[in-house]
Image: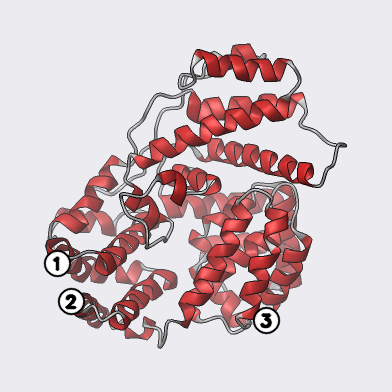
Amino acid sequence: MSELVIWQPESGELIPASAKTPSEISHYAAQLSVRDKKQIVSAFESGHFEMGINYLWGKTSTALKKELSAVGVGLLGEMLGKADVDEDDDVEDIITTKESIILAEELGIVSPTDAMRLKHTYELITHFSRLELEESDFEEIDESEAISSLKACIKAVLGRPKVEVAKKFVEFREALEGESLSENDPRVDMLRSSPYFFNKLTVSVLMNAAKKNAGANLEHALANINVLIPAIWPKLRESEKWQVGHAYAEAFADGKTTSVGGLKSALLKVRGFDYVPENLRSETFIKAAEAIFRAHDGLNNFYNEPAPVKNLAKLGSTIPTPALPTCFSALLCVTLGNGYGVSWAAESEAKSLLKTLSTDRWAYYLNNVLPSDTRVLDKLDSSKPLKKWMHLVDDFDLNSVEIKNPSVSRLMKASSEKNEARILSAKKKLIEEYYGKNA
């Protein structure tokens, strides 16, 4: 049976092991002009590694976002859960640098390994930017770190020509809003058999269309909601079911009668009204959690994280169920930190909030959210977050939580035993199950 797949691009021209100097490595940067290459090489050869990497990263980030924009700015917004994004928005304004790497990995523009190296380069830049803010002159980027970053950026992005991305899904996404699919349409079966990533993204596309579209496009979206949501409902996890219920509640509150009618019909077919929140209080929590993500992913994150975490804490310890996936993920990102450590003040506040959550809520997260929480899973590739994760599992006694997902169960057991190799093996399995590809 056919299924949607993430398109796997070929890497850029392989940088040979013999290419060791900045000049030799830069030769393979197909997307850089001769002038750009000269400036980067000059900075490296002069020992101004931080200056050279910052210039290199600016070119890399711009090129990556340009490739991402080829799939449509609206789709990128849907992937990030940003409902207020439309095709006229500038990709530079709506996507942070960290988000661009996550999206590039999800869409297959870069491999998981290249994404990990790009994230490391970005963390390196943000780390030394923070040290500069502290007026510290005792640490600086060394040559080996600079060379590794140069290779990572060229191999993953700058060494490749422009590529097509996720073409099969882009065509499917256009059909969701441009035509009404029948129950026996082969694309419905295709979606049923596809990796969970595409089910999650389809829900986002359809819910945003129900809230934002008008006229024929709205009619097509609502018709497809009534075909596709029942088709994939048994496969959907709690977070996506709440997303459908929340879309209905929001449309009802906004008086959008056409959307309300279509969404109500779909919810009745799957007996899904248990997932309609009684009020929109959850949206306040979700927005507060999204502010934590922005601080965590941005420059000087150690300084900027405490304020949004405190703001979330002020909303109260009783987090509405529809907001649990986003809030859990945000709090765990702060608690685990990145390859350079954590924001101590933010970590303390985040852990205090996590301690207020019951065992049932931890079970909800571990069973229904963690299997597709790539933000948290990706952190386990770094040594410091991995150690924080193992301590967290012990501190919260998470291995005693009832786990239904076999891969999550293996992850928790390995974490409790502090077996790093098995943790990474279980994490890799979860990523493969989510994307439907080898990680």
| SS at mark 2 in the image | helix
Residue at image coords 37%, 85%: 274
Q: Position of residue 370 (x, y in %)?
A: 54, 64
Question: Considering only order in the chain, which callout, 3 or 1, is on the residue closer to the N terminus?
Answer: 1
**Callout 1: SS:** helix
Q: Nearer the viewer, residue 363 or 263?
A: 263
Instruction: Look at the numbered disc 3 and give the secondary structure of its residue.
Output: loop
Say if 340 sits above or below 221 in the image.
above
Cα separation, mark 2 vs mark 3, equals 40 Å
Residue 219 is marked as 1
Horizontal and vertical percent position of residue 251: 29, 77
Q: Which residue is mark 2?
A: 258
Structural crowding at the residue carrying mark 1, measured as other residues with C-alpha within 10 Å and reported as few (<14), some (14–19) or many (≥20): many
As measured in the structure, the alpha-carbon distance from the residue carrying label 1 to the one carrying label 3 is: 44 Å
- On the question of residue 437 being in view, the answer is no
Q: Amino acid at mark 1?
A: Glu
Q: Looking at the image, is 422 positioned above or below residue 165?
A: below
- Label 3 crowd (10 A; few <14 / some 14-19 / many >=20): few
Check disc 2 and give the amino acid type.
Thr
- Residue 356, which numbered label? 3
Q: Is residue 121 left or right of residue 391?
A: left
Seen in the picture, residue 257 relative to 437 is either above or below; the reply is below
Q: Which of the two labelled residues, at mark 2 and mark 1, occupies the earlier sequence position?
A: 1
Residue at 19% of width from left, 68% of height from top? 227
